[in-house]
């Protein structure tokens, strides 16, 4: 359900702490599923340097 909403809404990221499902390797049309820690690290890299 969340995946379909993310794709339909053209989201860039879905943040999920469910690491057991293995879905964090999923990437589709620019949508990436990340853990909260991965997202924070990504955000710091992308936006704190600008």
Image (cartoon, rainbow, N blue to C red):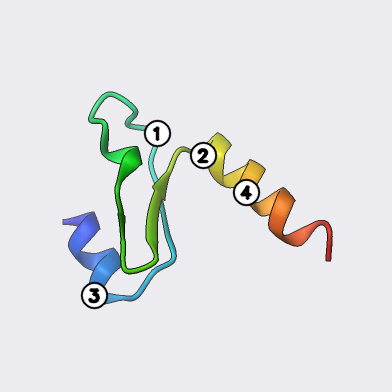
Q: Which residue is mark 4?
A: 42
First of labels 2, 3 by sequence position: 3
**Helix, strand or loop under label 2:** helix
Circles 3 and 4, Cβ within 8 Å, touching? The answer is no
Earlier residue among tags 3 and 1: 3
The reply to whether discs 1 and 2 touch (Cβ–Cβ < 8 Å) is yes
Q: Nearer the viewer, mark 2 or mark 4?
A: 4
Q: Residue furthest bottom?
A: 9
Which numbered dot is residue 8? 3
Q: Earlier in the sequence, mark 2 or mark 4?
A: 2
In the picture of the structure, the residue carrying the numbered disc 2 is 36
Q: CA distance from mark 2 to mark 4?
A: 10 Å
Dot 3: element: helix
Q: CA distance from mark 3 to mark 4?
A: 23 Å
In primary-sequence order, the first of circles 3 and 4 is 3
In the image, what residue occupies the spot 44% across and 66% down? 12
> Spatial distance from mark 1 to mark 2, Cα to Cα?
6 Å
Quadrant in which the C terminus appears:
bottom right
Residue 46 is situated, as x and y percent measured from the top left of the image, at 70, 58
Q: Nearer the viewer, residue 30 or 13?
A: 30
Q: Is residue 4 above or below residue 36?
A: below
Residue 4 located left or right of residue 22: left
Label 1: which residue?
A: 17
Q: Secondary structure at mark 1?
A: loop
- Work out whether 26 lies above or below 11: above
> What is the CA distance from the residue labelled 1 to the residue labelled 4?
15 Å
């Amino acid at each position: 359900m969340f995946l379909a909403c993310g794709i339909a809404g053209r989201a860039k990221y879905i943040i999920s702490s469910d690491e057991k499902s293995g879905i964090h390797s999923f990437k589709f049309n620019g949508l990436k599923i990340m853990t909260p820690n991965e997202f924070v690290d990504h955000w710091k890299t992308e936006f704190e340097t600008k």
